[in-house]
Image (tube, coloured by chain):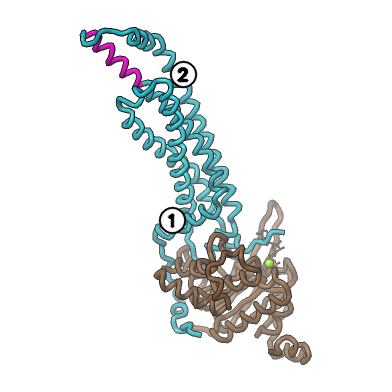
Chain colours: A cyan, B brown
Amino acid sequence: MSVDQAQRTHPRGSIGRQIQLPLKKAIEISFKSIKIRFWRSMITAMGIFLGIAFFSSVRMSGEFANIQRAYILQIKEDIEKGLRTPSIEDTRLIALLEENQEERQASENRMLWLSIMGLLVCTVGITNSMLMSVTERYKEIGTMKCLGALDSFIVKLFFIESTLLGFIASLLGFILGWMLISIINLFTQGVIAFGGNFWWASLKLMLLSVFIGTLLTFLATIFPAIRAAKMPPSAALRVEI
Amino acid sequence: MASQYIVRTKGLIKEYTMGDQTVRALNGVDLDIYEGEYISIMGPSGSGKSTLFNAIGGLDRPTSGSVFINDVDMAQLDAQELAYLRCHTIGYIFQTFNLIPVMTALENVTLPTVFAGMPTDDGIERGIELLNIVGLGERLHHKPSELSGGQQQRVAIARSLANNPSIILADEPTGNLDLKTGTEIIELLKRLNKEQGVTIISATHDLKMLDVSDRIVYIRDGKIAKIDERKDLDIQIGEMEREGELGH
Ligand SMILES: Nc1ncnc2c1ncn2[C@@H]1O[C@H](COP(=O)(O)OP(=O)(O)O)[C@@H](O)[C@H]1O
Ligand SMILES: [Mg+2]
């Protein structure tokens, strides 16, 4: 046996201090956790995925309306400057612009408000499922502490796990909402929908969606992560009857 | 002054309060454990074995009294020093194995070396070496769910040795195993105790443990009822039984 007995422990009467682990290790472990509990992770993430899909579809509808409005205003301006002779289609579009303006804005605001409420509900849902996950993993957490994990490491583990999920879920949610609304507008408006600042607006909305989704998941995890860190190492010994 | 004791408890009392009821799980335990000893803590269910395990292992603070590990009073340690102690000085073995389900056998054994800040390659090398020692060199990349109970406990034993602890604490290590597997685990613990000189403290109500123990501490209602020395025991357990258990 090649175990070196001389290196065992430290001088009597003295104890070292446990080191902080590099973030990379915590990320590695969190990543494994997500991968193994894939379906459970997916269900946790589903709320934020749908919430962000709803939010981004509402916002994207608004962007399409803006693009259309800008397009019509340009036509109107050209006509007023005498650069363009109004066609029947132009007149119809201009009439549409004046008629629906307020109503459309109001309905858009209502939807936005709804989607924000939806996101808040998801946040509570994530808190709930992360709390369940902490309760479920009491033994794992207790064991890690017995092996030398500091509270801060456990906190990191849970934050990384949920933030990673939140990031992926909100990115996918954005893609879903964005694609749905884009396809709908392709049929209702045609190619003009993809002119103007379509790509710029899409990019901004993507960043906003991912930011909101990740931030909400992060906030939702504060309480569960603290709870996990407070789990006593003696939890490792508990035996269910 | 350094003593020959690796663990000492003095007047250990632990009370659990649930609602308006107080249970005294440990009621004044004084116990001195020598370095390199194999010591069994025997007692019926609810007698306080796990509570003593928690106190000695620095997993829970006693209500009063003290625990000294290598002459260090555990009550004086802060969170980081306690974590260091759990990581480097003590190895834990549980009744329910407690492997991390998302990690392979090797990753489980390597985890304590990660917490100790050992370079990854050294940790892996150490993990493989230990899994070979416990006879699982062929199962490095199996998940706990792909291993039998006995194999899981072997992985757990390898993990407990990862950072060369001076003490291994085992709480009913054979409690979830069948007779034959339990015997194998006990023999493995005894072998490690002999070959590596690691002190083993095992809570149990498995009578097979009697054979390998240097001393047996009987605990009842949170108190030490008696302590049997190995040499006294030899007389009690007849020759026949000993041949049966230790024959090979
Ligand atoms: N976390 C706890 N909360 C309340 N009571 C506890 C707790 N842990 C143990 N006890 C009580 O302390 C006593 C000793 O328990 P324990 O140390 O687990 O015994 P053993 O391990 O010998 O079966 C029992 O009466 C048990 O009910
Ligand atoms: Mg017990």
Residue at (35%, 19%) from the top-left corner?
A: A68
Chain bearing tag 2 is A
Residue at (70%, 71%) from the top-left corner?
A: B177
Q: Is residue A148 left or right of residue A89?
A: right
Badges 2 and 1: C-beta atoms under 8 Å apart?
A: no
Q: Nearer the viewer, residue B121 or A222?
A: B121
Residue A176 higher or lower than A154, as above or below: above
Q: Which residue is mark 2?
A: A107
The disc at residue A27 is 1
Q: Nearer the viewer, residue B54 or B72?
A: B54
* Element on which disc 1 rests: helix
Q: Determine if marks 2 and 1 fall on one subunit.
A: yes
- Whether residue A92 appears in magenta in the rendering, the answer is no
- Whether residue A77 appears in magenta in the rendering, the answer is yes
Mark 1 lies within 8 Å of ligand 1 (Cβ measured): no
Residue A190 higher or lower than A228, as above or below: above
Q: Is residue A216 left or right of residue A38?
A: left
